[in-house]
Amino acid sequence: MADHVQISDTTLRDGEQAAGVAFGLAAKVEIARQLNQLGVDEIEAGFPSASEAEIEAIQAVSKVVTGRRTAVLLRALRADIDKGAEALKFAEQPVATVVAPVSDLHIRVKFGKTHDEVLEMVEDSVRYASKRFQQVIFSGEDATRTDLASLERFYLAALSAGASMVSIPDTVGYAQPEEFGQLVAHIRALIGPDVGLRIHCHNDLGVGVANSLAAVRHGANIVSCTFNGIGERAGNAALEEIVAALAIREDYYRRKTRLKLDEIYATSQLVSRLSGVAIGHTKPIVGDNAFAHSAGIHQHGVLRDRTTYEIASPQLVGAPERGLVIGKHTGHHGLRAKLTQLRVDLPSQAAFDRVLAEVKLRAHNGTDIDDATLLSIVDGLGR
């Protein structure tokens, strides 16, 4: 197994399916440029069958993507594949992801067909797509709620028809990390070590990142994910969390990515701005509080050695230094350090105690004290 894990970013496709999100052509191109700079291995640019405008946007994206793959999602229909070829006609490395339902539930409800009929559709569409694309991936929709025998049958048929990779999507975020890891290991053993194996995890039960990391441990070599975890329903596995976990815990995963980690924060901010989806303060890796310290005990430890409470520096992902947060939990050590940063020298311990008491009073409802407010408190009570 190669040491590197490939990252397939689907912010422009599955991320855009988040309720209320719609990237225009210019926004898609801007995000694609940044993803290119970040160094993801694959950019899934969209769903060509959505509209002519979507095809135009995918074409624009593919023109700015260099040195990496540009992918589109296609249903197992020849008409979809034709639209995909049109959308990616300018791409350096075009990739078609052909998707079809594989679970009993989806085959019965969505198609009203038999397994054999859907299998014939998969074989025909993959065979047709392989004549028009450099690489074809078959993705079995709702794979984690499909019995193994059926799943094996679909994947082996797709590979025989010309697919170069397969994808295991946890379409509705149903799987749990241990069982998903076991599923990935089973499919890896089935297809052999040299076939690309991509996974795509949704976050309906809050384990999208955990499932993705378990998959890496058990043989997946391509991870499909989105920035800030945006996507359908509760979203997708968050790219920034997966990549940071692989980097910080390389001792455990023994796999790494080729991404420029210090571009992560900037990319996250760009996606948030253009999608209109705010980043929570406590969001791992990219949230405002991810590298902030409020409690007095934590501040005391960090002032002595940052590694006491930080497993990585904000510089790793290009995040700004947040450091000490002055609020209701601030202690003596934290306030002294903040005053030193602001070049404030109080005349006495009594003055310091008055400032600290006022800080705690004003912050009693959870409001943080910014630098300007702190300086005003010093002017009023610390002289």
Image (cartoon, rainbow, N blue to C red):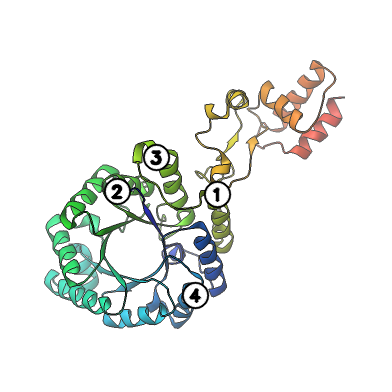
Specify the amino acid type for callout 1. Answer: Asp
* Label 2, label 1: how far apart the Cα atoms are: 25 Å
Please tell me which of labels 3 and 2 falls first in the chain.
2
Q: Judge whether 140 appears above or below 213 on screen.
A: below
Whichever of callouts 3 and 1 sits on the residue coming sooner in the sequence is 3
The residues bearing labels 4 and 3 have C-alpha atoms spaced at a distance of 34 Å
**Position of residue 199 measured from the top left corner of the image (x, y, whole percent):** 31, 56
User: Which residue is under mark 3?
Assistant: 250
Q: Which is closer to the viewer, label 4 or label 2?
A: 4
**Badge 4 or badge 3: first in the primary sequence:** 4
Query: Residue 229, position in %: x, y?
Result: 45, 54
Residue 190 percent coordinates (x, y): 16, 55
Ranked by sequence position, the earlier of labels 2 and 1 is: 2
Which of pointers 4 and 2 lies earlier in the amino acid sequence?
4
- In this rendering, position of residue 103 left or right of residue 61: left
Q: Secondary structure at mark 4?
A: helix
Q: Nearer the viewer, residue 224 or 162?
A: 162
Q: Residue at x 23, y 65 (%)?
A: 106
The amino acid at mark 2 is Ala
The Cα–Cα distance between marks 4 and 2, rounded to whole angstroms, is 32 Å
Q: Quadrant of residue 193?
A: bottom left
Residue 202 sits in which quadrant?
Answer: bottom left
Residue designated by label 4: 63
**Residue identified by numbered label 1:** 262
Residue neighbourhood size for the residue with mark 2, other residues' Cα within 10 Å, grouped as few (<14), some (14–19), many (≥20): many
In the picture, measured across the screen, residue 169 lies left or right of residue 58, that is: left
Q: According to the image, label 2 marks what residue?
A: 215
Q: Residue furthest top?
A: 349
How far apart marks 3 and 2 lie (CA) works out to 15 Å
User: Dot 4, how many residues are within 10 Å of its Cα: few (below 14), some (14-19), or many (20+)?
Assistant: some
From the viewer's perspective, is the residue at label 2 or at label 1 nearer?
1
Q: Residues within 10 Å of mark 3 (few under 14, many from 20)?
A: few
